[in-house]
Amino acid sequence: MVNWIWTMFIIVGIGVAAAQGEIHKVTEGAIKGAEMAVAVALGLIGVMALWLGIMRIAQEAGLVNLLAKAARPLMAKLFPSIPSNHPALGHIIMNLSANILGLGSAATPFGMKAMQEMQKLNGNRPVASEAMCTFLALNTSCLTLVPATIISVRVAANSANPTEIVGPTILATAVGMTVAITADWILRTYYRRRGGF
């Protein structure tokens, strides 16, 4: 569906430019957009490399397991079906940590590993488990305290005040995460009563 939407944007944009007799602006815009994409991507490499390196060191040093133990009381409430010493909890915590710091791209590998581990607990069934649904809700709506990626993009785009989005980001993501956790709890309770999951 998204592919169709973008295709329509491109077709309509080219059509409007042709109708106004300024088709050359399409080419100029495409070239300028490609240049900006490369500049932004290069600006993000440092932030991503730093965070992924820190995450790897934490994982190798055993800090993932320590974090999992420290966060176990909260994780036990959110993921009651995952055993306390299971590797899925470490990956979940690292994913949420990266999301809290606004590094969604760095969170992706941990999210994928967490889902793989939870799928093992799920017995490789084709239907998602409660824990998988809860993690998906948390992952997509996670509280963001430091939107590092967005700040980096704004710096690369020469924003006058790249950090002005921190306050609104914290507020919006806090509300989003609260709604997601509440909806997950309500739906989990509902489906349990109906015999689902």
Image (tube, rainbow, N blue to C red):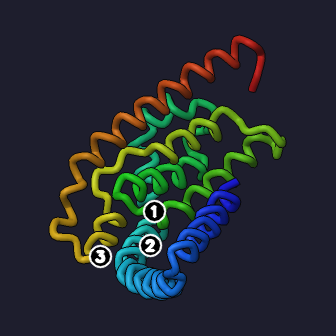
Say whether disc 1 or disc 2 marks the residue closer to the N-terminus: 2
Could you say whether the residue bearing mark 1 is in a helix, strand or loop? loop
Residue 61: x and y, percent?
A: 43, 68
Pointer 1 and pointer 3: residues touching (CB < 8 Å)? no
Could you say whether the residue bearing mark 2 is in a helix, strand or loop? helix
Pointer 1 and pointer 2: residues touching (CB < 8 Å)? no
Residue at the image point whose x is 83% and y is 41% from the top? 125
Residue 127: x and y, percent?
A: 79, 38
Q: Which mark is residue 62?
A: 1
Residue 31: x and y, percent?
A: 48, 88
Please tell me in which quadrant of the rendered image residue 49 appears: bottom left
Amino acid type, residue under disc 3 in the picture:
Ala
Q: Nearer the viewer, residue 6 or 117?
A: 6
CA–CA distance in space, label 2 to label 3:
23 Å
Horizontally, is 127 left or right of 29 in the view? right
Q: Nearer the viewer, residue 190 or 78?
A: 190
Residue 11: x and y, percent?
A: 64, 68
Residue at numbered disc 3: 157
Could you say whether the residue bearing mark 3 is in a helix, strand or loop? loop
Say whether disc 1 or disc 3 marks the residue closer to the N-terminus: 1
Q: Residues within 10 Å of mark 2 (few under 14, many from 20)?
A: some
